[in-house]
Amino acid sequence: MVELVPTLLRQELARLAEDDLRLDGRGRWEGREVSLETDCLYNAEGSAKVVMGDTIVYAGIKFELRTPWPDRPTQGSLMCGAELRPVAHRKYEPGPPSPQSIELGRVVDRGIRESGCIDMESLCIVPGEKVWGVMIDIHVLSDGGNIFDACGLAAIAALRTAVVPAERFDVGEDYTLKVNGTPIMASFTRVGGRYIYDPSEEEELGGDERIHITLGDEGHLHSLQKGLRGVFTPAEFAEIFEVAHQRCTELRELVANQEGN
Amino acid sequence: MGGYGDVQLLRDDGLRLDGRKIDEMRPVTVEAGVLPAADGSAMVTHGLNVAVAAVYGPMEAHPRKIQRQDRAVIDVRYNMAPFSTSDRIRPGYNRRSREISKVTAEALESVVLVERYPRSKIRVEIEILAAEAGTRCVGITAAAVALADAGIPMRDLIVGVASGKVEDTVVLDLDKAEDNYGQADLPVGILPNTGEIAFLQMDGDLSPEEFNLAMEYNFKAAGEIHEIMVDALKRRYEGGEN
């Protein structure tokens, strides 16, 4: 579907930006309310639902037994895929995975993989013969803006509740998947000329390029991605990097609190 | 239908494995308006099944070759999430989901007043998040509530429900074990107000008497689910807001 970018919306966003305002009244670095629910899908080995404003995302974890790669006989594997199905917005059409959904899945994948929160060696059952493949599937049900952060949060929250279904595969007893850390993504979009955190659907429609930052527990960078047309300065990045630290810490606490319950 | 004899599906006290009576359905919950991006939406849980439906439109139908000069077309996509079943499903359309999408679309086209919207398209997306037998029926129920939530005029709220046969006994609303090891499955889409049927499939083995009994169970259950659907829509629009 052709996305018509309303000139009026762009003008309005630029006008608001002059007074450092946003369409929905939020501050520049203010996120929408986030609600997180885990263990919410019966057949998934781990699951999470994230609601961020009008954005709704589910993530589900499944395990598969597979033979390891020949060059890594003692390592399991991790795969993360996101689907932008037509259910999520009128702009999404059926068909093979779109470039957007591939980018989305891969950015989330990198943040989790590169944080090292999953020890691939721990997924080995019989070296050279049998290892676990961990599959993270992300299902976007409603795109109300900033699906990247919602997907990243749902994926790690689901992963952290996952139980390895060893009994079903006849390789021992079920056990909780060991996840060392909670990588969190924070996304920024240029709207009205300056960056804002957690763009809404309208801000994405009338905005420009976006930057996604995934941070680990110690505040280390694990994944960066710039998307769409546009450029930014090191000073701009330094500014949003600071904000990313704060927002990621808050969301990490949300995940911890959810697990504490 | 699956195996024979070796799996006991009815207990010695005449109840089913999950403790239900022969003509008892699993608990059903319905919520309307769950997806902000959609024009209409609904979430239905039916036992352990979870289905979400979104409606977009009516909108311009394209490519133009799908346009009908005298009515709207309904484009249904039934899809199971990769994590909805015990073994992961590879994402993407398969023959089963294509067939279910097609017959579901035809059922909905029989209920929606499609003549009101010539040359347009109504998109219905059905996503199964958790599957535990009977997902096509749960999907139809969710689609009906989503269409109503989108304000699209219909003859009735169509209800998806199934009966079947296990151990030579007709039972209402098969669960997973009963579906796998039972002898027949009869999923239908019922219009409770008019008493009509807009969706019908069946596989397995049923005598004419068994068929009639299964249908009787289906109609009884459809009435119950219909009330839950209407309540959900009333809850959504109470106070006249939205």
Image (cartoon, coloured by chain):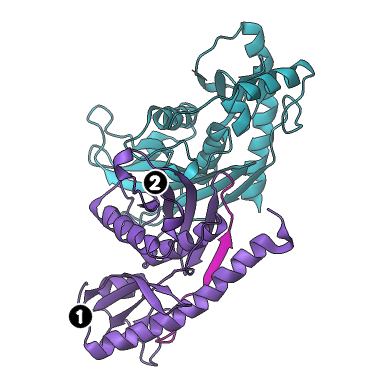
Chain colours: A cyan, B purple
Residue lying at 59% horizontally and 33% vertically, measured from the top left: A201
Chain ID for label 2? Answer: B
The amino acid marked with disc number 1 is Asp
B32 part of magenta stretch: yes
The amino acid marked with disc number 2 is Arg
Which residue was labeled with disc 1?
Answer: B205
Residue B13: give x, y in percent of width and height.
40, 93
Which residue is farthest front?
A: B70
Residue B213 quadrant: bottom left
Instruction: Report whether residue A170 is seen.
Output: no
Chain ID for label 1? Answer: B
Question: Looking at the rendered structure, which numbered label has been put on residue B70?
Answer: none
Which residue is farthest right?
A: A19
- A230 w.r.t. A95: above or below: above
Residue A56 quadrant: top right
Q: Are marks 2 and 1 in contact (CB under 8 Å)?
A: no
Decide which of B78, A214 is in the foreground and name it. B78
SS for tag 1? loop
Residue lying at 29% horizontally and 41% vertically, measured from the top left: B65
Residue B42: give x, y in percent of width and height.
53, 58
Residue A248: give x, y in percent of width and height.
64, 30
Mark earlier in primary sequence (2, 1):
2
Please identify the dominant SS of the magenta region.
Answer: loop
**Magenta span:** B21-36
Closer to us: mark 2 or mark 1? 2
SS for tag 2? loop
Which residue was labeled with disc 2?
Answer: B119
Residue A71: give x, y in percent of width and height.
25, 26
Residue lying at 26% horizontally and 57% vertically, measured from the top left: B99
Do badges 2 and 1 share one subunit? Answer: yes
